[in-house]
Image (cartoon, rainbow, N blue to C red):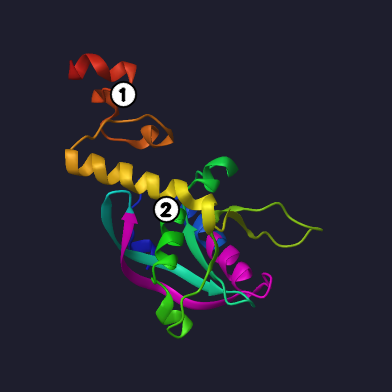
Amino acid sequence: MWNALAFDAPWKSAQEKANARAALERFLKWHVMDRAGRTPVASEHDFDVTLEAGEYEVRIRGQMDRVEADGEGRAYVVDFKTGKQAPTSAKVAHHPQLAVYQLAVREGAVDEAFGGARPESGGAELVQLRQGAPKRDGGETLPKVQAQQSLEGPEGEWVGDLLATAAGKVLDERFTPTTGQHCTHCAFRASCSARPEGRHVVE
């Protein structure tokens, strides 16, 4: 089916096909390796939970790429990424998507996958399928894995504050743009008030 996909040029099609094959091979090698005794318990797991966020209640609906359990019954949420860019380690520690997944686990989002029991969150991680981790002893390339530690206890209080701030902005209709890596592929960059080159257009 690959030849039915539209690309700007034949060389681009070949390049992307090679990238897709490499990403799939990384996934398969990662899937079968022993990762501290963790085993998959759900994939493409739908969830719908309501989280307490300050004075607000925030309903979160979504789908977790993969949920795993370790030998102690803790839950880990895995999110697969296929983009060219990966966040820094510091940003992964406060990665909003992973953090919300962990909050959702705390509120029962994966209970069904654990036989109705409420598991403790062991953490969450990004698996960068498009990016290989450094090879060990000349072995095969595995995907780059970026882990976020468990946010159980005081370490996770910032997530609730983040959700409360987001809820307040939505209810007050305060959508102030901020700059970041996303600016490189944003369609509104030329007219964005957060960037110097766009201010004259908005004003």
Query: Is the N terminus in the top left, top right, bottom left or bottom right quadrant?
Result: bottom left
| Residue 92 in picture, x, y percent from top left | 53, 47
Compare residues 160 and 134 and report the one nearer the observer: 160
Q: Secondary structure at mark 2?
A: helix
- The residue to which callout 2 is attached is 97
On the rendered image, what quadrant is the C terminus found in? top left
Q: Amino acid at mark 1?
A: Ala
Mark 1 Cα shell of 10 Å, populated few (<14), some (14-19), many (≥20): some
Q: Nearer the viewer, residue 18 or 76?
A: 76
Q: Mark 1 = which residue?
A: 194
Instruction: Indicate whether residue 157 is drawn in magenta.
Output: no
Q: Position of residue 20 (x, y in %)?
A: 49, 59
Q: Is residue 118 above or below residue 127?
A: below
Q: Which mark is residue 115?
A: none
As shown in the figure, which amino acid type bears the numbered disc 2?
A: Gln
Q: What residue range appears in magenta?
A: 23-52
Pick whichever of labels 2 and 1 is earlier in the sequence: 2
Q: Residues within 10 Å of mark 2 (few under 14, many from 20)?
A: some
Where is residue 156? Give x, y as percent: 49, 52
Tell me how far mark 2 sits from mark 1, CA to CA. 23 Å
Q: Residue at x 53, y 57 (%)?
A: 153
Residue 86 in view here = no
| Residue 57 at x, y percent in the picture | 26, 56
Residue at x 50% of width, y 45% of height: 94
